[in-house]
Image (cartoon, rainbow, N blue to C red):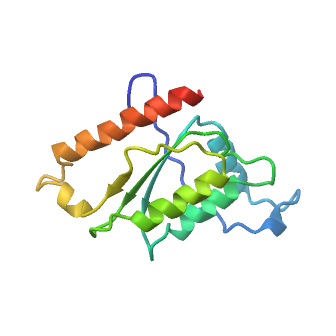
Amino acid sequence: MPEGFEAVFLEIGNLPFYNEDLEVEGKVPTEWTTFRNELQSVDGVFFFTPEYNRSVPAALKNALDVGSRPYGASSWSGKPALVVSVSPGAIAGFGANHHLRQSLVFLDMPTLQQPEAYIGGIMNLIDENNTIKEDTVNFFQTIVDNYIDLFNRYN
């Protein structure tokens, strides 16, 4: 990350599935509250997602739903976003990337439009020492630089 920026990983795998019936005092799972508080503490979001059946994994969709509630108090709103999809295949997560982008429009998250980040053949981008190849590192630097420009326009 560039100087002055810090990356924080938000765990989404432990979130109970979203159910609006639980959005009443005394029933909200503590994991939802913790996640929402953590999300509110960040200024922008990088989304890295694999593609399953031409869409995002259930855990990611669930995190979007949990963070978007209660209605009118979305923790996502206004946070600049970067979407990167990865896949072992040549399609490079195109479906997941675009499904996620559709949700981010509704969640009011300004999203980096260019360059788009589809990482296909992910296993071919790591050398025999399990190091990411230089041209891939350079591409990631390009998208991060462009994201920082977007971020600075909104913060």
Q: Residue at x 32, y 68 (%)?
A: 91
Residue that extends furthest to the top in the rendered view of this protein? 4
State the image coordinates of residue 95 (x, y, percent, origin top left). 44, 67
Name the foreground residue: 79 vs 26. 79
Question: Would residue 145 appear left or right of 36 to someone viewing this image?
Answer: left
Which quarter of the rendering shows the N terminus? Answer: top left
Q: Is residue 129 above or below residue 145?
A: below
State the image coordinates of residue 102 (x, y, percent, origin top left). 58, 59
Q: Can residue 13 be seen in this view?
A: no
Residue that extends furthest to the right in the rendered view of this protein? 25
Residue that extends furthest to the front in the rendered view of this protein? 114
Q: In which quarter of the image is residue 149?
A: top left
Q: Is residue 4 above or below residue 62?
A: above
How many discs appear?
0
State the image coordinates of residue 153 (x, y, percent, origin top left). 54, 27
Q: Residue at x 49, y 61 (%)?
A: 98
Question: Would residue 112 appear left or right of 32 to someone viewing this image?
Answer: left
State the image coordinates of residue 90 (x, y, percent, origin top left). 27, 68
Q: In this view, does 153 lie above or below 71?
A: above
Q: Residue at x 13, y 52 (%)?
A: 129
Residue that extends furthest to the bottom in the rendered view of this protein? 53
Which quarter of the rendering shows the C terminus? Answer: top right
Q: Which residue is drawn at 62% across and 57% down?
A: 64
Q: Can residue 26 be seen in this view?
A: yes
